[in-house]
Image (cartoon, rainbow, N blue to C red):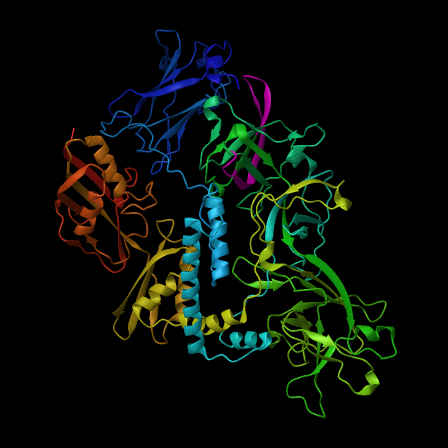
Amino acid sequence: MPDRLADLIASATLNGIDFVEITGADQTSLRVHFLNTVAVAATLAGTNPVTITGGESIPAVPVEPLAASDWGVDDAGRPMLELRTPFPGDFSRYQLRIESAALDSFYSSARFSFKAGCPSDLDCAPPERCDEPPGGVPVIDYLAKDYTSLRGALLDYSASAYPQWVERDEPDLGMMLLELLSAVGDDLSYLQDRISHERTLATATQRNSVVRHARLVDYEPRPATSAQALVQIDVSSATLPAGLTVQAPQPDGGALSFELGPGLLDPETGGLAAGPLGVDPRWNRWDHTALPAVARIVPYWWDDSQSCLPAGACELWVRGHGFGFPVGDRQLGTTGLAVLLDTEAASPADPPTRAVVHLTGAIEEVDQLYGIAVTRLSWDATEALAAEHALERTVLAGNLVPAVEGRRYAETFVIDPDPDSPDAGKAAVTRSGPDAGCGDPAPMHLHTLAQGLLAWLADTDGTTRPELCLIQRPADPGDLPRTWRWRRSLLDAGVFEPAYTVDPIVYRDIRVDRSSGLPGFEYDGDGGNSVRFGDGAFGERPPTGAAFELTYRVTAGQAGNVAADSITVIPDALSGVILSAANPFVATGGADEETLEHVRATAPQAFRARQFRAVRAEDYEHTAEELDWVLDAGASMRWTGSWLSVFATGQPRAGGQPTVREHGALIQLLGRRRIAGYEVYTPAPRYVGLDLIVVVCAHAWALRGEVEAGVLGELGVGVLCDGRRGFFAPGQLRFGAGLERSELEAAIQRAVGVEGVVSISYRRRGYVPDFVPMPEVVAVGREEIIRVDNNPSLPDYGSVRVLVQGGK
């Protein structure tokens, strides 16, 4: 890339902002300096060409109207612009932008601070970035319980966290420690299972019986779920039907199939999903017309100083026009195109940095200085990048398609067919239903899946649904096919509702001669699944002679959780349609059937562990904390004249006050759990802002500015480099919890260079006008929570002032 700043300084047609200077002590007078001598005064656009935005407590600062006398030049003949504002901004950094045809689009704005002239002993250099460990947060398999699975999980983790350790011989010290830890974990798991067995006294041996026992205590055993992955495909055309498959090779020489599309069923109709996939050759990762193939969508940076996309970024530019990116609008509930940002690591030993964002804007622009066509892509702040991306090693790609592990099969069966008809060999299983008598046999109809273990999909709320579509063929030519709906339990089905359920049971066909009197089918174990219809009281009983078409997906369970970049094999039949495929992230969600032992150990404990009633104040607190937006909760009971009333308050994770929707959800949840005769009120949280003055003594070798910064970091609200949260970070102080002076002093002592704490003074905002010595405990009410955010723009949430004695 050329040097943009140098080229702009030498330009005779475009100018740019060099820096912004605060010229008055009242912080309302500003002076804008420019890069070269190109005139800017007569080129301003609009009625308000100069804007100042980006503040926290004061989001925007207006600029007074400009006059001709506000323009001047410096000693080098470069323009200068004097600006005046009616009031200064807060302590955050603002963005000053000037709309002018004479200014370069990249250098038409500059960041500055109204408080640039304030004295400070702190180092002005940016703080060191806390790098995350390679590989991110380790994936913990909580189902690993015995020696073999724990050993395998530790080997998998060590391979990703310590790739340089490849020794696997038993005499190796690392292997000895790994196997020792696996043995300890196996012993702990064995003890847990044994204790659980002794407490529950479960005796069921058939899986179907165990599942029904578990449901009596509202526990749903997990079936075999299919892994789900996001696959980036390059296509040759914009029309691609759902249901196509790609594969992931396996170590044994086989391959796991992944079907493109979100699932087998259409959630609206219950039938097979057949909608086309949203793909386009313009969004391919590679340009396959070039040999060798080159990246199609590449980033563009305006200056070499901007070649690294920082963490938290919500926009970037790419080269070229005409991509046709669809964009979404969060307020309208629409979702834009999913785009992959794939950044290769600087070292081949490190994993790439990848992120997926959904576009909310795609604006075509032109770099005026070089005449290069660019497109600005933007996405919502909720998808801000979690890590930085080096743009020179970054490639973008669309055509991100969900994929589900497994293969689909189709079968047909008939309810009680005529023995002499062609459908006699497709008879469904017929069993005597419960409470059946000679006068009313009440048959129960089932059909066992022939091809393998039925695949289930796990939803975000933890529930599962089967990948199975059941359609009844029309009996007459003029009728329409009838779709039957799945119910987890037929007890929830109406009398005439076309519903079915799935039982984890297998029946074997033992028919030899139907005239011999032998039963047609017998129970054959738990290694499969069967569709079961209603009995006429709970769910409709299928009519005699009804023919059904059954389409379902089978799964390999946990084996489908393949690694990233594993789903790469394209069947020969699709080689001209799909040009390439790869999954940028690991496949997740695949799991084997929950073992019977695990169900026996878990179901009774889950029933006892979760209570759907609130009696004590602590019960109301725990109930409120079940909501995902509640960080902490406080509750108290008061006598209000005739009965006890409960006052429960929730602290939002985002800080501030809960929204109307969050407040309503809290009222509804506590109303269901409260004791009859009690009233529940949910007042907003009351934050107690404390101002602290901390006087410390520094070691003789320590720099006072560094000691001050260290103390402020320990008492901050963020995350420190070693992973610890600051003393006043959200969630560290609970509702009604007082501030212990001893704990505060211990946190201050952890700062590097602190020899001792001399004194701590405090005041409670709105209560105490002057600072007083801090007592042993600063007490607050039960619905109150202490906050010391130390944000100059939000002074009501407390502040910290550190005075350092000694040091150098």
* Residue 616 lies in the magenta-colored region: no
Q: Is residue 279 left or right of residue 177?
A: right
Q: Position of residue 455 (x, y in %)?
A: 64, 61
Decide which of 669, 88 is in the foreground and name it: 669
Q: In the visual, does 507 lie left or right of 49?
A: right
Q: Quadrant of the C terminus?
A: top left
Q: In the rendered view, tell whether residue 450 sits above or below residue 277.
A: below
- For the view shown, which residue lies furthest in the bottom direction? 439
Residue 374 inside the magenta-drawn segment: yes
**Rendering coords of residue 255 (x, y %):** 67, 51
Residue 509 % position (x, y)? 75, 76
| Dominant SS in magenta | strand
Of residue 542 and residue 635, the one placed in the foreground of this image is 542
Side (left or right) of 551 relative to 477: left
Image spot of residue 370 (x, y percent): 56, 17
Instruction: Identify the residue at horizontal 60%, vertical 53% (top origin).
Output: 228
Task: Give me the residue at 47% from left, 61% from top.
Answer: 147
Is any atom of residue 581 visible in this view? yes
How many marks do you count on the picture? 0
Quarter of the view holding residue 671? bottom left
Nearer to me, 122 or 598: 598
- Tell me where residue 125 sits by quadrant: top left
- Write the start and end of the magenta stretch as one range: 348-375
- Vertical placement of 744 versus 27: above or below? below
- Asked whether residue 681 is in view, the answer is no
